Amino acid sequence: MAGIGFALKKLSDREDIIGLFAAGFFSAFIACGPWLFTVVALSFIMVFGLQVVSAVELQEFQIILVYNFSFSYVFFGFFGLVVTRYISDRIYDKNYHAVSDVFFGSLSLGLISGLIIISCFYLFVAKMTLPEAVSAIINFIVLTSIWHASIFLTVLKEYKTVSTTFLFSLFSSVFISLYLGYEFKILGLLNGFTIGLCIILAVLYSTFLSNFQYRIESPFKFLKYFGSKWQLLLSGIFCNSGIWVDKWLMWFSPNSFVNKLNLTCDLDYSNAMFIASLTVVPSLAFFLFGTETLLDKEILNLFASIREKASYQQITFIHKKMITSIFNNLLLFIIIQGAISFLSIISSYKILEFLNIPLIQVDIFSFGVLGAFYQIFTFYLVMMLYYFDRLNSVLIIYAVFFILNASLTSLSIHMGFNYYGTGFFMASLLTFLFAGIITVIHLHKLIYHIFITNNS
């Protein structure tokens, strides 16, 4: 699954600024396309939206998108990691036919179950007109489909097509939303945004189908992985829910409100956290074309030496070299993200002012930046553990993050507005430290695990 990283690394290896910039640009959209698209497009619409709709209508549109992004992302967590692992194993087996099977099988199950759940919510819980409810449901389905398609991006290796599509659709979505919003108000904004998403979805699916033209035979064979790889199922749920649980709890804080659509939200907290999350996009891009390829190379070298029956001294030498390379890369990772986070915090007033976000959210934004800083390094450590198939360890890490984020955010709400964001920050910091301890212990005992605990 790291194959697209190697394709992108060729750009950065050109040893010129254009190649490095191109690799970073393409990697950003591959690594976090749906998330980047939604947050950036929504930010532009919030900046210019008051020229076409009222503040109340713009707020209603924003809340619907927050709900759909939240629900689709967490819903995606129920099958995302399991499907990813299944695809990875089938590619390793060179069984490309199974990739087409799981594509259609997971898509059909995801859409049917998602449609039932979200329809009940918007039709019976939210107080919407029928056109508004239908538009919100369609937006959710398209978002969920894009999350589904994102699993297969690394298989396609069509990074130029995917990246340019996300960029084109981003600006198209903003333009169409504002144009239709002027004529049809909230319905125009919502459906215009969905049209932009549909452009992305059409290109992603057509690209996949053109590369995997196989007859569908066993579309639900991947379901057996929900039993054999149950840790991935729970990890996906804890991970995606953990990222959102602080936002959900803030929906019931004293600062929250219920709009006329009967949707509860705290936009002060959500807006600041969404913008703060963008500060880790460069690091995610660097991870895709730099770190992941390094991990893949170093770890494969270790296992190759074992398969070739190298001496114990040779294996331990390669093991130590691998650990040194990994932590040198992590240090570089920390320096890059540290500089970005520092600049974001000292520029926080100007950033929020440009985006028309109330400056009262500056502290929340700063804590969000710090939390995202530690969260991205937890992601680095988790990916390393996945390479060594430490599924139980990853599950524990994500469960700890979910529990910490929920409990510490609840405490911050009790302490008052000045402490909003500290729960997420402290949860991210403590989870990073916990994940670091687990990773160091495992790397230290890696040779033992390879020959003893994983020897089957």
Image (cartoon, grey):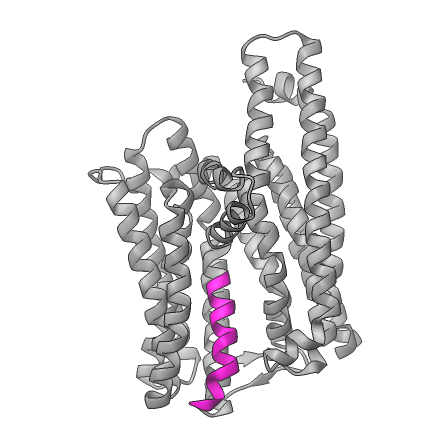
Please tell me whether residue 304 belongs to the stretch shown in magenta.
no
Which residue is most to the bottom? Answer: 54
- Residue 178, how many percent across, how many down? 39, 82
User: Which stretch appears magenta?
Assistant: 36-52
| Quarter of the image that includes the N terminus | top left
Q: Position of residue 38 (x, y in %)?
A: 47, 67
The residue shown at (74%, 45%) is 434
Is residue 49 one of those drawn in magenta? yes
| Location of residue 87 in the rendering, given as x and y in whole percent from the top left corner | 40, 38
| Residue sitting at the far front | 16
Which secondary structure type mostly characterizes the magenta part of the structure?
helix
In the image, residue 103 sits, relative to residue 313, either above or below, namely: below
Please state which of residues 333 and 428 is positioned toward the viewer in this rendering: 333
Q: Nearer the viewer, residue 205 or 393?
A: 205
Q: Please give the name of the residue rendered at 68% of the width and 38% of the height, measured from the top-left corner.
A: 329
**Residue 354 quadrant:** bottom right
Furthest-left residue in view? 215
Q: Position of residue 216 (x, y in %)?
A: 22, 40
Question: What residue appears at the point 74 percent right and 26 percent down from the top-left corner?
Answer: 444
Query: Total label count?
Result: 0
Find residue 174 and report its image quarter.
bottom left
User: Is residue 296 positioned above or below 340 on the image?
Assistant: above
From this viewpoint, is residue 62 visible?
yes
Given residues 251 and 307, the one toward you in this image is 307
Against 155, residue 72 (above or below) is below
Q: If the image is split into quadrants, where does the C terminus sit?
A: top right
Q: Is residue 190 visible?
A: no
Q: Is residue 64 left or right of residue 295?
A: left
Depth check, front residue: 107 or 358: 358
